Amino acid sequence: MKPPRSARQWSLFAAGIGVLIVLATSLIGVYASVQDLGAPIVPGILFVGGWVVILGGLVGFFAADE
């Protein structure tokens, strides 16, 4: 895989990382609820952070001048 070269490619790369964060923290949350561990705060914070990364990547993609 070639590294991203343009601002749009970097923005999509960041959004993809955000998607991975959201998926991982969602799985952790499901596991915690199945195991009756309560609501873990750290995965919740990372879940919100993942959405921030996704939205930031999409804003950067559409704001790029290329």
Image (cartoon, grey):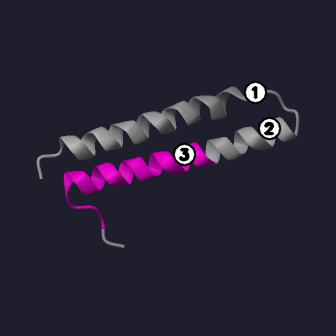
The residue drawn where x is 47% and y is 45% is 18
Using a 10 Å C-alpha cutoff, classify the residue at mark 3 as few (fewer than 14 neighbours), some (14 to 19) or many (20 or more): many
When asked about the image quadrant of residue 2, the answer is: bottom left
Mark number, residue 39: 1
Q: Would residue 22 be found to the left or right of residue 57 on screen? A: right
Q: Which residue ends up furthest to the bottom in the rendered image?
A: 1
Mark number, residue 32: 2
| Residue stretch in magenta | 3-23
Q: Which amino acid is tagged 2?
A: Ala
Task: Describe the element under mark 2 as helix, strand or loop.
Answer: helix
Q: Would residue 38 be found to the left or right of residue 15 on screen? A: right
Q: CA distance from mark 3 to mark 2?
A: 16 Å
Task: Describe the element under mark 1 as helix, strand or loop.
Answer: loop
Contact between labelled residues 2 and 1, with CB atoms less than 8 Å apart: yes
Residue 28 percent coordinates (x, y): 71, 43
Quadrant housing the N terminus: bottom left
Q: Which amino acid is tagged 3?
A: Ile
Residue that carries the numbered disc 3 in the rendered image: 21
Q: Would residue 21 be found to the left or right of residue 31 on screen? A: left
Using a 10 Å C-alpha cutoff, classify the residue at mark 1 as few (fewer than 14 neighbours), some (14 to 19) or many (20 or more): few
